[in-house]
Amino acid sequence: MSISSALTNALSGLTAQSKAAELVSSNIANVSTPGYSRRELILASRTVGTPGQGVQVVGVQRTVDQALLGDRRLAQSAAGDAELRAGFFKRVEQSIGTPGDSFSISGRAAALNSALLEASSHPESESRLSNVLSSAKALARQIGSASKDVQAARTAANTEIASQVNQLNASLARVAKLNSQISIGIAVRQDVTSLQDQRQQIVDQIAKIIPVREVQQPEGAVFLYTDAGKSILDVVPAVFGFAATRTVTPDTTNGAGLSGLMLNGNPVSTSGGSFIAGGTLRANFAIRDELGVTAQAQLDAVARDLVERFADPALDPTRALGAPGLFTDSGAAFDPLKEVGLSQRLTINAAIDPDQGGGLTRLRDGLGATTTGPVGNSALLNDWRTALTAAREPVSGNFMTGQRSFANLSADFLNSVATSRLDADGEATYAAARLETFTVMEAENGVDTDAEMQSLLQIEQAYAANAKVIAAVQQMIQAVLDI
Amino acid sequence: MPQITLGDLTQSKVFNQRNTLLKDRIQSLSTEVTTGLTSKTTERVKGDYSALSGIEASLAQLSSFKVLTSETAARASTMQLVLNSISDNASALSSSLLGAATSNSATRINTAGFDADQRLQSALSALNTKLGATSLFSGQSTDQSSVTDRDTMMTALITAVSGALSAADVETAVNAWFANPAGFEAVVYKGGDTQQAIDISPDEKAKFDVTAKDPAIAAMLKGLALASLLQHGALSGDNASRAQLALRASIVLSNAQAPFLEVTARLGTIEATIANAGIRNDAEKSSLEIARLGLLAVDPYEAATKLQDSQTQLETLYAVTARMARLSLVNYL
């Protein structure tokens, strides 16, 4: 029966080449699809009884480098983490402002110093005194707005955590579902490559949030572990829990007004050693609970230093004992127990503000003055200025010990933020470069149209040859029939 | 058979990266070329803003000191002019009084008395000179005139000398009135205590402690007032005593010159301090500006060269991208 065998062989060749053409077309169609893995046809010669029974399609293979994929995902997590942190510090640095920017905290402090200096030469001048008032207000406002920016960053992180936790739960559930579909598909010998592509893309999404490692199971499923080895998906997906809150204020922290992270109903740590460390979820927790809190504490310490400088009992004898100084905590005297959030409540004493029923003359006569003194008296104005520039030890904020002027304290605050920003930037640059390298390496395994066209040429040729075989067989059979 | 392939996306990713990198570099270099300053301040100061912050704070303070030195300089020189005019008045009057006293002529004595009255008037109004809204000799009460007008002063003085029968009695009464806190200081001086010193440089102050009640100025006013009494009918009818009074007034005036000169000299010292402070401030400002440039400046030649390099690289990248895009087997099939 060799003629009919030849016909069968040729037919199997035609089938295999059609399948190959199908794959080539699919590859070319997806040349720029992100997350698409190039398909290859696996062929083998058919052996039914005797060898040489044509060609058979063994299966379709996705070309995926699992090790590279894993590395790329870890790099992606690290890059996301570093980028978020660097972004936070950059934002804080911008809201503090660098010296030379007139809107910076140190620029505002310098402006207040200048205003006091100029007023001391002409204490009778209304414009000079009101300049003192407006510079003092601007300084208080600048510190307040920096604090608002810090809190806005914390709020954004908090909101982001909520949406990431939702996304994480949804993604894990979808991976679990795809796992079972793929296992079934493989069992019944279906083409599961698109499902696998889809699953890979979802795991990529998870990897942006938590650094994750994928472990292939023999039946086609994947189990997911965090980089620290904690299982988040085996047969059933883990469920993360987080209670979203709308706003974050200086006095709300993790556990006190803000939700922590739950895993399958149990609270888990979100600090540096946590199993989520290394991804954007952890970066958001870090911004909300650590970096943002530290920045706020330092800002409050700067605000406290400013308040206390102008509330010295030796300064301004007209002020009643315990009464607020030039800068106040929402109009009241500063209470050391209520330091948290002081920077947002920092205001000017209403006694000197004509808009709040005060009088500018109290800047030179004293905050508690009831009568107007000599208009050319600059003694208190000089004292205010001395209070601003005197060397003083900051009480809080974990600043290095040592006395310094207010200008130096604000510079030290900026230094600590700027140094952290540089470190974070360095990390981010490194992580981004690593991610780029892996991404490029991954792209190298992607669809190469030249190679596809080349194989298309081969397919065309092989198809034509198989068809030619059929034509020849037909002639042979015809020759027999013509006898 | 394993195929060696290179995914199409590789090229586009690599080109993309290079493109972003080059554009970013061109962006920051073009800022540096146009401003001459680094575009990455934090990176340049390595996160330590202490020096820069100190420089900026000092520069801001120096610009205020510039305002203060020019204001105080103007003030000192105006005060100097006022004092000179009073001193000139007094010495002119002193000699005319002496002439009148020795001539014993009633007319000349009357004329000298009239002259003295006028000069007292001008001395008082000179002491009331304002610079802008600031009264110069009123101490802290810069909104007040420093002295009262001539008529108030002379009315009080005439009451004080009433009953005096000799030139010596008149002088004693006038001396007593000037020494009495309820006299000159209460009636004539309208200002307040002396003003606090004004900072004119980081470590120098200018203290304007000259007020209209300064003993040297008061002595000068005393001489003028003594002579002016001639015009206001003191010892009228007794020509010899009036001549005596004119002589005594002339002596008081010339004796007042020396302490008055000391006040002028004191002001002169303040003027010199201010001028020196101004020069030092300017010098400090330029050296701080140079230091700031040292911290932030970029070498314009280097920046321009790098910019040119990056531009060339970007153009090459465009050319390569375009060429590579055309290189596809598809075009040859």
Image: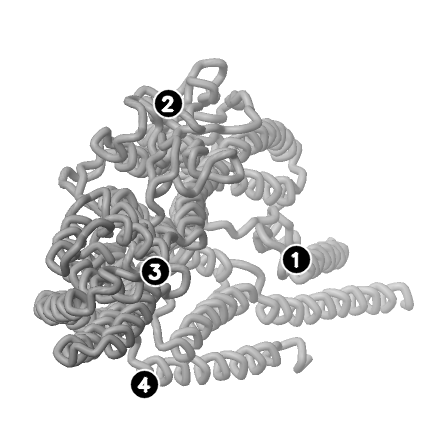
Q: Residue furthest right?
A: A482
Determine the CA span between mark 2 and mark 1.
Answer: 42 Å
Disc 1 element: loop
Name above or below for residue A133 compared with residue A253: below
> Counting residues from the N terminus, which is met first, the one under dot 2 or under dot 1?
1
Residue displayed at 29% across by 55% down: B138
Q: Nearer the viewer, mark 2 or mark 4?
A: 4
Among the 4 quarters of the image, the one containing residue B221: bottom left
Q: Are marks 1 and 4 in contact (CB under 8 Å)?
A: no
Disc 4 element: helix
Determine the CA span between mark 2 and mark 4.
Answer: 54 Å
Q: Which mark is residue B150?
A: 3
Mark 1 lies on residue? A30
Q: Which mark is residue B301?
A: 4
Q: Are marks 1 and 4 on the same chain?
A: no
Drawn side of residue B121 relative to residue B7, left or right: left
Q: Amino acid at mark 3?
A: Arg
Q: Nearer the viewer, mark 3 or mark 4?
A: 3
Q: Which mark is residue A269?
A: 2
Picture coordinates of residue B295, whole percent (x, y): 25, 68
